Amino acid sequence: EPTDVLEMLEDVTDRFSFQMQQKHIKSNIIVQEGIESVLFDRDQIDQVLDNLVSNSLKYTPDGGLVTLEARLTDDYQLAISVQDTGIGIPKKDIDHIFDRFYRVDKARSRNMGGTGLGLSIAREIVNAHGGIMTLQSELEQGTKVSFILPIVEDGGVMV
Ligand code: ATP
Ligand code: MG
């Protein structure tokens, strides 16, 4: 059954609404006009989104903003991104960030809980769907994780 993309992004923020309220973090959802529903493995993509939003909430101080966006690429693939206004990731760590168990210096992650698996699992799921995941980050400015899912005929049709 096709997934309504806007509804999917609203559902993610709903699942985290308690944590967002606690940290006074606001969310913003942007869905490009023309994107309605897409056929793909909703449970798996939910797991990707949950990992990304959970990171944004962990690594964004009180009062921040998390923006979820869905758009179509020039070659009609679905691009989804999760962007925050958090602590960011140092340049030297960005190349390793998708490695299993990798966490940016222990001091800042120690109190946060977690194992360092979230991003590697998220990327594996996206890769398994024929997509790619990338990360951009600026220290003390924020982080944006984007992934692209191919919309293939039959397999994932835009309707
Ligand atoms: P887990 O996801 O297993 O609970 P984790 O969040 O530490 O643990 P990952 O999600 O794989 O592990 O992230 C790896 C590391 O990348 C984190 O420890 C953190 O240092 C950094 N990181 C990930 N997302 C962000 C973000 N949005 N802002 C700043 N740092 C981030
Ligand atoms: Mg994580």
Image: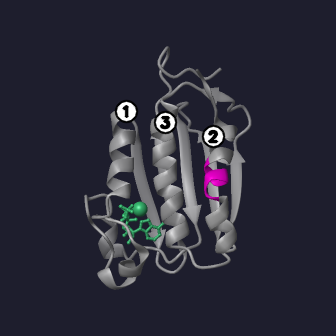
Residue positioned 32% across, 53% down in the render = 120
Residue carrying label 1: 130
Q: Nearer the viewer, residue 1 or 137?
A: 1
Based on the picture, tell me whether residue 28 belongs to the magenta stretch: no
> Circle 1 sits in a helix, a strand or a loop, which is it?
loop
Q: Earlier in the sequence, mark 3 or mark 2?
A: 2
Which residue is rendered at x = 26% and y = 59% of the image? Answer: 99
Q: Residue under circle 3?
A: 43
Q: Label 1 neighbourhood size at 10 Å, few (<14), some (14-19), many (20+)?
A: few
| In the depicted structure, whether residue 12 falls above or below residue 36 | below
Q: Alpha-carbon neighbours of circle 3 within 10 Å: few (<14), some, or many (≥20)?
A: few
> Start and end of the magenta stretch?
12-16
What is the chief secondary structure element of the magenta stretch? Answer: helix
Q: Looking at numbered disc 3 in the image, what kind of residue is underneath it?
A: Asp
Q: Residue 62 is drawn in which quadrant?
A: bottom right
Residue ID for mark 2: 8
Q: Is residue 14 magenta?
A: yes
Q: Provide residue 97's location: percent of width, then percent of height.
A: 32, 63
Colour scheme of the rendered structure? one colour
Front-lying residue, 10 or 65: 10
95 and 58: which one is in front?
58
Residue 11's place in the image compared with 143, above or below, is: above
